[in-house]
Image (cartoon, grey):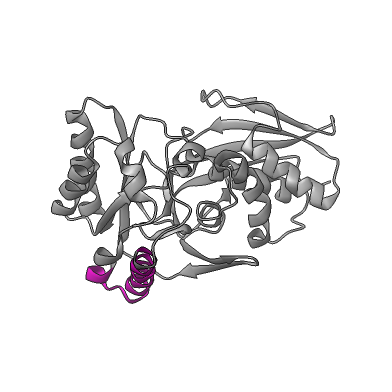
Amino acid sequence: MGKTEVTIFGPATVSNVGPGFDLMGFALEQPGDEILIRRNDTGRLVLKDESGCNLPLDPAKNVAAVAASALLNELKCHDGFDLVFLRKIKPGSGVGSSAASCVAAVMGINELLGNPFETSALVPFAMEGEKVASGSTHADNIAPALLGGITLIRGYEPLDIKHIPYPSDLWCAVIHPHLEIRTLDSRKLIPTEVPLKTALEQCGNLAGLVAGLTTGDYPLISRSVKDVFAEPYRINQLPDFELLRNSALEAGSLGTGLSGSGPSVFSLCRGEEMATGVGRVMKAHFVQKGIESSIYVSKISEVGCRIL
């Protein structure tokens, strides 16, 4: 018999990345989820929360369990597993909390079952869990969390995921103000149709961002990190967002925007020193507002979900 338990790390992710709404994301080295997955003899999924995040323990309402069930159903497998949440990104933080859990669950169970699926083939199962959190099926957190690096989802029917090359000295500062914004609620703020002019601007920015990343053209990256689809409707959820963005840009950020649906804000930076300085400036913004926050400074992670 093979392994009976495994501990998996699912990384935090930044999604949208400016103009890449539902299409682009990248993995961070920290923070992340740690889930211990072990076989049990109950024939069902049993959830245990040791993370302190007060997670739902009903398998129908827990995103990791929904993703795991999708994988087990596809395999027609009736084995039982414990999912023990050891460390958890705070839900509603805007750095892919639900995606980190989903990818960790499917990778761990796939491993214990002898890897019937290649890692990239696990994306659709993890997306089923993400659907519970956001109300829609999107992979801009799931793909980088599972596969690492910067990923572009060219299309969803069929799913077409491409890794985007990027400069080796690209870092990110992420500020997480201790406010909760539910993705499900935040998506409702966005109009379902946009004018042609807006669509063209967004397409130009996304194409410019991809071109800038692949060629290491930092000024082009900086001009392109702009979202005209979702961000204008979401930024009022944060105090003085434009002031925060301008402060980060003055401190050297290449581009600053909402991470996912917020409340976290990311700044792409050239090098660790610049990212650290930008992080301090963003932290100071929320100190002035009397809002506690956490700062993460990370290189873009080449690897995604992994066995510890």
Residue located farthest toward the left when viewing the structure as drawn? 250
- Tell me if residue 117 is in the magenta stretch: no
Which corner quadrant of the image does residue 81 belong to?
top right
Residue 167 appearing in the image = no
Residue at 36 percent of width and 30 percent of height:
179
Which corner quadrant of the image does residue 214 belong to?
bottom left
Residue stretch rendered in magenta on the structure: 198-220
Whether residue 150 sits left or right of residue 221 in the image: it is: right
Residue at 64 percent of width and 43 percent of height:
129
Residue at 60 percent of width and 25 percent of height:
49
Residue at 31 percent of width and 51 percent of height:
257
Image label count: 0
Q: On screen, 307 above or below 194? A: above
Residue 124 is situated, as x and y percent measured from the top left of the image, at 66, 55
Residue 206 is situated, as x and y percent measured from the top left of the image, at 38, 67
Residue 77 is situated, as x and y percent measured from the top left of the image, at 85, 46
